[in-house]
């Protein structure tokens, strides 16, 4: 597994480079060889034309004729000795690379230079004879037909020689060995091969460097994911690239952040669960212990005074009511916190629900002579909600306001309906809440140390929070010590 991607990338790069080198080299060799041959034949044709011109000019000078280019003599039937041709050809061969033959049509002789061997016209192959006949017709041709006669691979150019009357009286054949052309081609191929090998080596080294650079961020991400799987969510890839790898690294970092946040949240939940179980045990144990002690005292006959016995009964009844209320609140909160528990919503008038809650709690204000100031300026505000749950929410808040308000005080309820939201504010004149405690008032089993809250379960405001969240209602609390507390319900439109 180790370095497998690096090896694959290097292998793929190498295969592609080899294919590119072979294809490019093959095309170059074919093109270069063909081009070299064409260029060599073109050079031979130019040289052959010049030789023909030289022979014509020389013969015109010797015979006193200066008319007409490419003219050997004015007498078609005159013969020229082989020695004369041989001398002229030898002089010309010294200035070029190749063998020169001259064929006199009248004598049907093949005149060669001193460096060649005698060739009889009748010994020429049929293909060569055809080529010579084309030259006598006035065409310049090239061929490799003379290789069998010269006993070595050659390329030949045949060009006509004209007399002063414009008639072909001879042809010039210029031969050059293919080995000279092949030597140049081999030199070119060698240079190409060396260049390609050097380029291939350089590119191979570069591909290794690039492959390693490509794999480096992948290795970092592999290490980070392995660390994440081991439970350490603080690691990051530190890969910053504007490509797909950079995007993958970014998502891994985001995943690590989410996992880190989730771990912290789960730690908090676990701690909350432990605190919750501790508080439940404490809240249930205290009244149960008191009730048990009272029952044991009554059973053992320790208490015989009738008035004290009645006091014990009253205390046990109060403790049992407190236990029942706490258990009911726990069940209610558990249901509301369960995401699978669906509350039934219908179109309700929030003003009617608030008025119903105020009417239900007015009797509790009589003993403390508390005035609930609620002027019903708004008559209707409808929304989809659970009537009983919203009523429960308002009752819990109003009950707390009455509980913490001193005698002869006032509780104000304000309703404000704007274009953006509907707001209900419940303000009391109680002891208030310290600023450091405000963030905890909606936690389970949180309760103040006030004497008026001795019978509280510490679950009321937690239930209020769950009901509000189920109805998309924002809760806001403003409190000043000794001045009172205001609870606001904000319903976005």
Image (tube, rainbow, N blue to C red):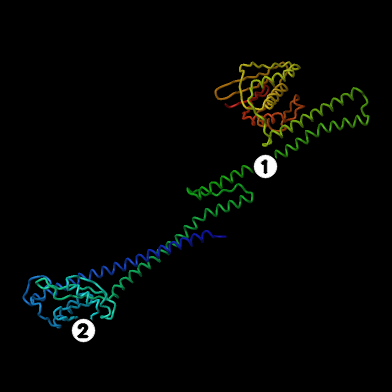
Q: Observer-nearest residue: 365 or 390?
A: 390
Horizontally, residue 367 falls left or right of residue 300, namely: left
Q: Is residue 26 above or below residue 355?
A: below
Instruction: First in sequence, mark 2 or 1: give its number.
Output: 2
Horizontally, residue 30 falls left or right of residue 126, namely: right
Q: Observer-nearest residue: 426 or 180?
A: 180
Q: Is residue 288 above or below residue 206?
A: above
Q: Residue 94: give x, y in percent of width and height.
A: 19, 77
Under tag 1, what secondary structure? helix
Gap between marks 2 and 1, in whole Å? 110 Å
Q: Residue at x 32, y 67 (%)?
A: 32
- Nearer the observer: mark 2 or 1; the answer is 2
Please name the residue that numbered disc 2 is placed on.
118
Q: In which quadrant will I find the C terminus?
A: top right
Q: Observer-nearest residue: 153 or 375?
A: 153
Q: Residue 337: give x, y in percent of width and height.
A: 68, 35
Q: Quadrant of residue 338?
A: top right
Q: Observer-nearest residue: 475 or 146?
A: 146
Q: Residue at x 55, y 52 (%)?
A: 221
Under tag 2, what secondary structure? loop
Horizontally, residue 481 falls left or right of residue 121, namely: right
Q: Residue 276: give x, y in percent of width and height.
A: 73, 37
Horizontally, residue 232 falls left or right of residue 108, namely: right
Q: Quadrant of residue 318?
A: top right
Please name the residue that numbered disc 1 is placed on.
267
Q: Residue 100: give x, y in percent of width and height.
A: 20, 77
């Amino acid at each position: 597994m180790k370095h497998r991607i690096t090896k694959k990338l290097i292998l793929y790069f190498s295969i592609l480079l080899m294919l590119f080198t072979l294809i490019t080299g093959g095309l170059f060799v074919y093109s270069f060889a063909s081009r070299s041959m064409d260029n060599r034949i073109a050079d031979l044709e130019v040289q052959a034309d010049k030789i023909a011109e030289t022979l014509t000019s020389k013969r015109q000078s010797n015979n006193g004729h200066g008319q007409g280019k490419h003219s050997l003599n004015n007498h078609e039937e005159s013969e020229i000795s082989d020695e004369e041709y041989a001398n002229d050809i030898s002089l010309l061969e010294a200035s070029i690379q190749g063998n020169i033959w001259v064929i006199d049509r009248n004598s049907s002789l093949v005149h060669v230079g001193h460096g060649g061997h005698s060739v009889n016209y009748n010994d020429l192959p049929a293909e060569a004879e055809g080529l010579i006949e084309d030259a006598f017709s006035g065409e310049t041709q090239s061929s490799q037909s003379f290789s069998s006669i010269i006993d070595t691979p050659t390329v030949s150019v045949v060009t006509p020689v004209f007399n002063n009357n414009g008639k072909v009286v001879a042809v010039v054949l210029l031969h050059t060995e293919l080995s000279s052309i092949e030597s140049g081609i081999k030199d070119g191929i060698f240079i190409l091969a060396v260049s390609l090998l050097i380029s291939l080596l350089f590119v191979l080294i570069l591909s290794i460097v690039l492959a390693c650079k490509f794999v480096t961020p992948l290795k970092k991400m592999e290490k980070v994911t392995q660390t994440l799987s081991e439970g350490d969510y603080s690691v990051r890839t530190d890969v910053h690239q504007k490509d797909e790898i950079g995007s993958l690294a970014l998502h891994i970092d985001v995943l690590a952040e989410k996992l880190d946040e989730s771990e912290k949240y789960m730690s908090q939940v676990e701690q909350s669960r432990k605190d919750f179980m501790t508080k439940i045990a404490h809240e249930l144990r205290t009244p149960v212990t008191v009730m048990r002690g009272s029952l044991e005292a009554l059973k053992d006959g320790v208490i015989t005074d009738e008035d004290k016995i009645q006091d014990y009964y009253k205390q046990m009844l109060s403790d049992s009511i407190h236990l029942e209320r706490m258990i009911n609140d726990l069940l209610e909160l558990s249901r509301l916190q369960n995401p699978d528990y669906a509350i039934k919503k219908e179109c309700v008038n929030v003003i009617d629900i608030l008025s119903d809650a105020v009417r239900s709690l007015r009797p509790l204000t009589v003993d403390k002579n508390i005035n609930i100031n609620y002027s019903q300026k708004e008559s209707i505000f409808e929304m989809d909600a659970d009537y009983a749950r919203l009523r429960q929410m308002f009752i819990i808040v109003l009950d707390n306001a009455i509980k913490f308000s001193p005698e002869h005080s006032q509780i104000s309820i304000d309703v404000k309906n704007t274009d953006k939201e509907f707001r209900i504010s419940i303000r009391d004149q109680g002891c208030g809440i310290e600023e450091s405690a405000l963030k905890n008032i909606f936690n389970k089993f949180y309760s103040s140390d006030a004497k008026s809250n001795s019978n509280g379960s510490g679950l009321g405001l937690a239930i209020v929070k769950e009901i509000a969240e189920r109805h998309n209602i924002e809760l806001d609390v403003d409190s000043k010590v000794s001045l009172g507390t205001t609870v606001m319900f904000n319903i976005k439109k």
